[in-house]
Image: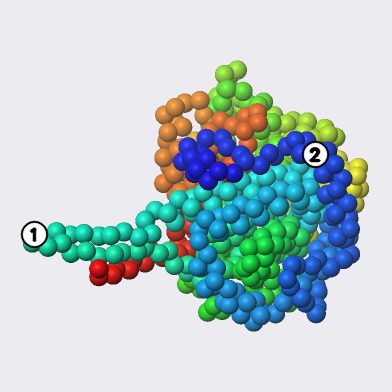
Amino acid sequence: MNIDQLIKANHSRNYFSFYNENPKSYDENQMNLGLETFQKQLNNNFYISNLSAVEFEGEEVSPYMMTGLGIHYPKINVSTLLENASSTLESWKNVSIDIKLSILQNSLECVKERFFELAFATMHTTGQSFLMSFQASGPHACDRALEVLASAYEQLNYYPKNVEWVKNFGKFDLKLQKNYKSIPKGVSLIIGCSTFPTWNSVPGIYASLITGNPVIVKPHPKAVYPIAIFVEEIRKELIKNGLSADIIQIGVDTTANPITKLLAESDIVKLIDYTGGNEFGDYIESLGKICFTEKAGINSVIIESCADFDKVAQNLAFSMSLYSGQMCTAPQNIYISKDGVKTDNGHLSYDDCIQKINDAFSQLLNNPKAASPTLGAVQNENTLNRVLNTLKNNNANVIQFDANVINEEFPDARIVKPILVELSSNQSGEFEKECFGPISFIIKTSSLEESLNLASNSAQKYGAITCLAYSIDKEIMQLIEDKMNSVYTPVSFNFVGAAFVNQHAAFSDLHVSGGNPSGNATFTTTEFINKRYTWIGNRYML
């Protein structure tokens, strides 16, 4: 894990992955060991290194088994979390960048040994499929951490530690000794989400730690286990190096007795990373602290023309079905002109397009090997109820897919068939809001111009993380790119086959632009690193 190699990968933005995402590339016994460890943890306390607690609490429920996991975590009161974090600030600040890097890289290697346990922990707290749980929570999250470490290491070594400064005054030289220090901003709070508890939180954790800031992780009460594994392995590495384990802590709460606001509003907390809904995200931003937010957005698909609409429809069916639409990058609004779509095989009417999308969904959902692993399970009842209420409230045509999806291993799993709603462009009140979960809208517009205006206006007003567009006309592609980029939304063009708009790759893709209401930060630009510390220069007369 050579840091120069990681920095080079960061600059090239080409494909690079240090941790293999294929479960079959790991020792065949690790799957069984991971499952055994997960099963042993059920209905038991999760102990944290160098942490004693009188009380334990937890309320995680498996969306597959539909039963509580029975795992309880140390309950540490807010004042203790804050005091512990404050007490470690000076010591962690003074640890060299190279030692910090070594500790954090080693922690990732230790997490690697728990990838399969981590996969089952993620699967049974979030509802992701096993494969997505393995990849997103393990290799992909760890690759994102390495991307952060590489960027931070380069930035923190941008200036020399010491320099002898000389200015000639003719008859004499003025000599000054100067040093340059990066001073961390202070205690960092990481607020996790229930759907991607590690992928979304790990970059902020490692960015704050490598820049010298102690961290308090406040996971979602329904998805603690996955991120607790990361916290535990970092604490172990800190202890090995003779440092306080409380440089990173986990603050667990319940939905009935939340502690997030108490932590966020404390004067001790200087940095906040947040992933979640808009309302709470707006509150975090209103605190006036340095914060890095990823909130909700409305992701659009614009279809003007394509080579093969069948391939487009198959790609859309998978993208909209993946993890039942519970991804921040999932496409929601599909804009198609009433005049239909031009293809290499001839013109398709609007109704033809709808039928082909319907057929693609039916083909996917009727494939027993693909349907259940693609959909996963709905993480919580609130998401399901939100979808059902959306259907009740709109006056629209619901496209029904001929399929009945069940998970044979977990027959009680909370699975719902994706819902596709057909709307007209004058029903903006129905589609100009995020509908998180297994529901998407096809919107019939008067023209490409209206489609593009609706998509860009939506991004500007309500936020967007991604936009997917289909066109075989280079001028139109440039028009779409320029229009969507002007509202700080990246565009993916003509994705078919194995390329999906939902997926963002470490060391290459910039996740969230930070320029529209979907969030104010980007994984993992230099700003994501540099706002966590301040450069100070000191001068000594020689």
Q: Is residue 366 above or below residue 524?
A: above
Name the quarter where the C terminus is drawn.
bottom left
- From the image, tell me which residue sits under label 1: 170
Q: Is residue 510 left or right of residue 126?
A: left
Q: Quadrant of residue 237?
A: bottom right
Q: Indicate the position of residue 305 as horizontal and vertical percent values.
A: 54, 27
Residue at 74% x, 45% y: name it. 134
* Closer to the camera in the image, 196 or 404: 196
Residue at 88% x, 51% y: name it. 36
Farthest bottom residue?
79
Q: Is residue 166 above or below residue 288?
A: above
Under mark 2, the amino acid is: Asp
Residue 82 appears anywhere in the view = no
Under mark 1, the amino acid is: Gly
Residue at 48% x, 57% y: name it. 529
Residue at 67% x, 75% y: name it. 259
Q: Indicate the position of residue 201 as horizontal and vertical percent values.
A: 63, 58
- From the image, tell me which residue sits under label 2: 27
Q: Secondary structure at mark 2?
A: loop
Q: Secondary structure at mark 1?
A: loop
* Closer to the camera in the image, 60 or 315: 60
